[in-house]
Amino acid sequence: MILVTGGAGYIGSHTVKELRERGEEVVVYDNLSTGHIEAVGDAHFVKGDLFDTELLKKTFKDYKVDSVIHFAAYSLVGESMTNPAKYYHNNVAGTLSLLDAMLAENVKYLVFSSSAATYGDAGDGLITEDSPQNPTSVYGQTKLMMEQFMADYDKAYGMKYVALRYFNAAGAHVSGEIGEAHNPESHLIPLILQVPNGKREFISVFGEDYPTPDGTCVRDYIHVTDLADAHIKALEYLKNGGRSTHYNLGNGNGFSVKEVIDTVEKVVGKKINRKIAERRAGDPASLVSSSDKIKKELGWKPKFDSLEAIVATAWQWHSTHKDGFDK
Ligand code: UFG
């Protein structure tokens, strides 16, 4: 049995769906603070907090858990700068509680959602797993600290982990059944889609004076089901005796904020009003991934390799679920 923390959240729920489609037994552990019970599907569900080490231990025992995929975390770069306490408590202390429960119950395998935000401002080239990690945000710092705990727990206790450093997760499941539903929304693509959905008059472009070709921030957008597939491959790798390691996950193509808005206009077939606004604190200018390592070592390959295809799945979800799961 695989325990998925944060399995009611955006990337977690897509991974749970993919696991279930492949016939895996899954128990979702989520406090539903930002997740949605509707996104859990037919997996087992335990409502619980990461800080509840005793409930985690009980869940490991009750469901005979042998491995964990750990998504549960707060993940907003901007908020982490204004409320660092929330991020250090939940992401860092919460992960320690999970690791301690795993140790107590002898659960040895962990796939963990890390982030491109651990690299910080890495220049405009492709980022590899060996690029320096100097986070520019508290959020990125919490993910880096979590990676460090895992490395130490492996050395001392033999707990095996794969840290997946995602770039910008985007899109929705092709079935149209689940998708991105943050409240309030802060991510670029769903916010742009609120304009054609009639929920927002314009999209704000955060900064036009970055050292990038058009002055707006460049990101590497990766489809959420491609991320899900990578988690499953990483877990299989660990169960087959693989060593602890780190992988980047992106498409290897950078798109500026303006290019993303242009792509949405094309997919939706409507003009999107835009306004230039101030920079947002904590945002690096450019984050683009080299994902060669996971391609070579685990045979992972993204199915959605164009931004248009990714945005089309996001539009399918958002145009039919204007208020997320409360439609
Ligand atoms: N942006 C705007 N206007 C908006 C919202 C966002 O211009 O209204 C810009 C941001 O400044 C940024 C880009 O669009 O340059 C993407 O912003 P998102 O908030 O969608 O995503 P981030 O790049 O900030 O962060 C996301 C995840 C993090 C993860 C990071 C890794 O939220 O968890 O990707 O790249 F760490």
Image: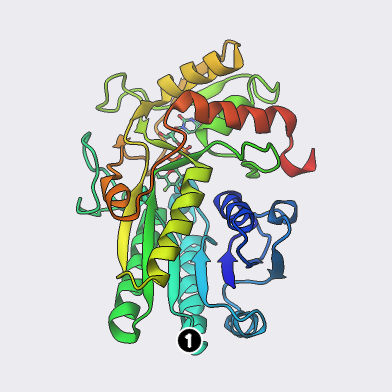
Residue marked by disc 1: 106
Nearer-the-camera pick, 244 or 29: 244
Q: Residue at x 58, y 57 (%)?
A: 19
Quarter of the image where one finds residue 324: top right
What residue is drawn where x is 48% and y is 63%? Answer: 85
Whole-percent x and y of residue 217? 35, 30
- The answer to whether 326 appears left or right of 243 in the picture is right
The quarter of the picture where the C terminus appears is top right
206 shown above or below 61:
above
Q: Ligand 1 shows up in which quadrant of the image?
A: top left
Query: From what the image shows, is residue 323 above or below residue 275?
Result: below
Question: For residue 57, what is the image quadrant?
Answer: bottom right
Q: Nearer the viewer, residue 240 or 245?
A: 240
- Which quadrant of the view contains residue 172? top right
Extreme-right residue of the structure: 327
Residue 134 x/y as whole percent? 25, 53
The image position of residue 256, as x and y in percent, is 37, 25
Q: Is residue 107 above or below residue 134?
A: below
Please provide percent x and percent y for residue 157: 35, 85
Q: At 68% from the left edge and 36% from the top edge, which residue is drawn?
A: 176
Left or right position of 148 against 316: left
The quadrant in which the N terminus is found is bottom right
